Image (cartoon, rainbow, N blue to C red):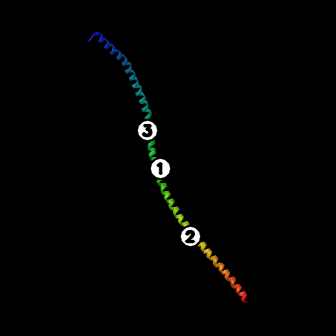
Amino acid sequence: MQLWAQAVIVVCVLAVTVALVPLLVALRRAAERADRVLAIAEQELQPLVSQLQALVDDLRLMSGEVRGEVGRLGALAEQAQGLSDGLSRVMSAIAGLSRAGQLVGVAASIKTGLDVFLHRLRKQQGENHE
């Protein structure tokens, strides 16, 4: 290989080396900054993660309590439905008694009316026979 070609190659290698050294230094600084930022983020996130875990635990506990309360409300709703059905039957029975009472009242009124009518009729017949 000729001397001038070797000189060109050496100059090119030196130029590339001179360009790569600042690049590598900049990459090293960027990596160090990224490492510091990640360390700060890790320090800040650890308490948040702990708090988040506590919140998740509280949420689990509360959801279990809510499930229990919903179950109790369902049981109360069933009892209320049973009570409502019972009251409905009692009201139907009272309504039946009321109707029967009305019928007895009507019958008693008819009987009283008949008794009065017959009494007056007998009274008039008695006055007519005398």
Q: Quickly name the residue at label 2.
A: 96
Kind of residue indicated by mark 3: Ser
Q: Quadrant of the N terminus?
A: top left
Quadrant for the C terminus, please: bottom right
**How many angstroms separate mark 1 from mark 2 (CA)?**
44 Å
3 vs 1, front mark: 1
Please tell me whether residue 103 is drawn above or below residue 119 in the rendered image: above
- 20 in relation to 108, above or below: above
Residue at left 70%, top 86%? 125
Q: Earlier in the sequence, mark 3 or mark 1?
A: 3
Q: Residue at x 40, y 24 (%)?
A: 30
Task: Report the side of 96 relative to 125 (left or right).
Answer: left
Mark pair 3, 2: CA separation: 68 Å
Q: Position of residue 100 (x, y in %)?
A: 58, 72
Q: Which residue shows up at 45% across the image and 49% down it?
A: 64
Q: Categorize mark 3 by other alpha carbons within 10 Å: few (<14), some (14-19), many (20+).
A: few
Give the amino acid type for the residue marked by disc 2 in the picture.
Gly
Query: Between residues 39 and 15, which one lies in front from this camera angle?
Result: 15
Indicate the amino acid at tag 1.
Answer: Val
In the figure, residue 5 lies in which quadrant?
top left
Residue 4: percent from left, percent from top: 30, 10
- Mark sitting earlier along the chain (3/2): 3
* Tag 3 residue: 50
Q: Is residue 107 left or right of residue 3?
A: right
Q: Which residue is mark 1?
A: 66
